[in-house]
């Protein structure tokens, strides 16, 4: 079946496309929109205490926002603490054994607040956040673009 016929029959969602391709496309969309404000020291920030340097990619903040939006789409109700575990990694301590270290909660909170400001994400009553109806439509539209581009 053709791609358009399949998308009309059941709809292409974020879960149907490659996550890496979706995050790249959605980050480009967020940057093109121009509604997300970058933090003042975005070029100097590390993403967590386990990192030695700031990210090399200039658009890393948009990529993190897109990644958070995708993860919220897949699993609603996740909070800042849960995301800090997801984005955490092993901290290398020289000759000592490595230990797991959580990601920076301030950066995650800032990304989620920017997504809230744009209208992609909202807080839930039980705590955590979820994707709004508008955010879900945006994500599905980008997912369809990624799906049709792959074919």
Image: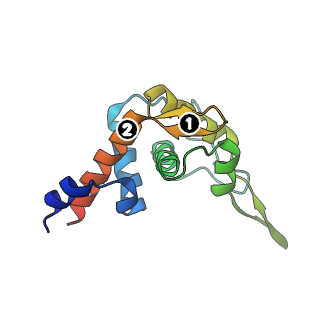
Image point 19% across, 61% down: which residue? 6
Q: How is the image coloured?
A: rainbow
User: Can you say which quadrant of the picture contains the C terminus?
Assistant: bottom left
| Sequence-first disc among 1 and 2 | 2
Horizontal arrangement in the rendering, residue 22 relative to residue 106 (left or right): left
- Residue 83 lies left or right of residue 149; in this view the side is right
Query: Alpha-carbon neighbours of circle 2 within 10 Å: few (<14), some, or many (≥20)?
Result: some
Element type at marker 2? helix
Residue 42 visible? The answer is no
- Residue 56 at what x, y percent from top left? 52, 53
Q: Which quadrant is the N terminus positioned in? A: bottom left
User: Which residue reaches farthest right?
Assistant: 96
Residue 124 percent across, percent down from the top left: 59, 34
| Mark 1 and mark 2: Cα distance apart in space | 15 Å
Residue at 55% x, 41% y: name it: 43
Q: Quadrant of residue 148?
A: bottom left
- Residue ID for mark 1: 112
Task: In this rendered view, identify the residue nearer to me: 143 or 103.
Answer: 143
The residue to which callout 2 is attached is 31
Q: Residue furthest front?
A: 9
What residue is rendered at 48% in x and 45% in y? Answer: 69
Q: Nearer the viewer, mark 1 or mark 2?
A: 1
Does the CB distance between marks 1 and 2 fall below 8 Å?
no
Q: Is residue 128 left or right of residue 98?
A: left
Residue 42: give x, y in percent of width and height: 56, 38
């Amino acid at each position: 079946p053709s791609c358009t016929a399949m998308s009309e029959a059941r709809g292409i969602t974020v879960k149907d496309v490659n996550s890496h391709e979706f995050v790249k496309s959605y980050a480009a969309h967020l940057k093109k929109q121009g509604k997300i404000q970058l933090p003042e020291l975005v070029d100097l920030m590390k993403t967590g205490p386990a990192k030695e340097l700031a990210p090399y990619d200039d658009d890393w903040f948009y990529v993190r926002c897109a990644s958070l939006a995708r993860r919220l789409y897949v699993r609603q109700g996740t909070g800042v603490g849960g995301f800090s575990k997801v984005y955490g990694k092993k901290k290398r301590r020289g000759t000592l054994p490595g230990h797991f270290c959580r990601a920076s909660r301030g950066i995650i909170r800032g990304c989620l607040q920017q997504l809230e400001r744009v209208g992609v994400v909202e807080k839930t009553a039980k705590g955590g956040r979820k994707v709004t109806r508008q955010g879900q439509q945006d994500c599905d539209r980008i997912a369809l673009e990624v799906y049709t581009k792959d074919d």
